[in-house]
Amino acid sequence: MVGASGSGSRPVERRVVLLGGAGALLAAAGCTGGAPGRGTAPVTPTTAPATRGSLPRATPWRPLSGEIHPEVKLRAARLVEALGTWPSGKSGRAAAKARVTALRLPAGLVDRAGPLLPSADAAVFQVVYAQYGGILSDAASVLVVGRQWTRHGDRVTADGTTVDVRLARTGAGWNVTDLRPARPGAAVVSLSAPVRKALADGTRIALPPAAEADLRSGLVHDSVADAMLRLARTYRLEVSVVRSGHPLHVFGTDRPSDHPRGRAFDVWRIDGRAVVDPSTPRALIERLMRDAAAAGSYNVGGPVRLSGGATPDQFFSDNTHHDHVHLGFRR
């Protein structure tokens, strides 16, 4: 079975790549604290805070050893980093196209960059996490979740977005075919009490910019916020995706996903432990999944398929969900 946020059933193998010198693009922009080392690395790079008139230093995103097809995620993450990061004097579409072609990708992808290319003197994009929206043997969706800082004169502004990066496998490797940035919608003045509480609980519920904007748009069901609040009593949740930036359909199918309808959210890290990290206790992930079902999720996906659900299909697992826990709601 494939859940409401799942992918098709064509298998892919597990494979780990070693990285060396992967920070060249961010280093060229003066926005990295150094090139990454080899092997297992932290999922979320540290980002030094910005000071007046300066941008923070960001580090390139790197996968952990538990990733399936890490080279696919790296391809997507490097493109988004290149599009969303530039030093003074390198703003604009022409410079962005040069950065993209340096990655041996089509310059036309710049036309799909949207919010990654705001008007600014300089910018830096820090990937929070690169999560699968779907992974098949020959096609993939990578949801690159990140924060972006832009500088206008002496003013530094913090924002960010999530980009659904589509890739296809060819004889030469994985190539990017499309970019689909998140479109959260405008913030509304009046929000429900559960949504207001979830937004206010930054200590227990960490929301990236696009996910926070989703809640502020008023387009997310209270069932999502209620579940976040209930689970936050026990866990520290780091959310990756809520509504926008996720494929409209379950990847590889024509079935609508619960995410774009505001009826789902994904958790990529629990109590500071990444779901994809092999060192994260499996018991912690399984406990969150069962607690998610108890919090009202009819469709709980993760790196393991649990037994004992209220329905035979309440719990599911596939390659897409090896890196996060998905919670879907009927309303």
Image (tube, rainbow, N blue to C red):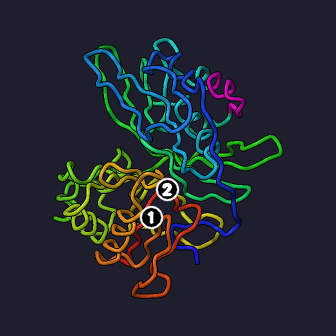
Q: Is residue 309 visible?
A: yes
Q: Which mark is residue 53?
A: none
Dot 2 falls on a residue whose secondary structure is: helix
Q: Viewer-nearest of labels 1 and 2?
A: 2
Q: Residue at x 33, y 14 (%)?
A: 153
For the image shown, how many numbered marks are present on the structure? 2
Tell me if residue 100 is in the magenta stretch: yes
Q: Which mark is residue 259?
A: 1
Residue type marked 2? Asp
Q: Residue furthest bottom?
A: 311
Circle 1 crowding by C-alpha within 10 Å: few under 14, some 14–19, many from 20: many
Q: Position of residue 177 (x, y in %)?
A: 69, 45
Dot 1 falls on a residue whose secondary structure is: loop
Mark 1 and mark 2: Cα distance apart in space: 17 Å
Q: Residue at x 59, y 44 (%)?
A: 73
Residue 124 figure quarter: top left
Q: Which residue is mark 2?
A: 323
Left or right of residue 179: residue 304: left
What range is drawn magenta here?
Answer: 97-107
Tell me if residue 169 is in the magenta stretch: no
The quadrant of the picture occupied by the C terminus is bottom left
Q: Eyeballing the image, is 200 above or below 252?
A: above
N-term mark: 1 or 2: 1
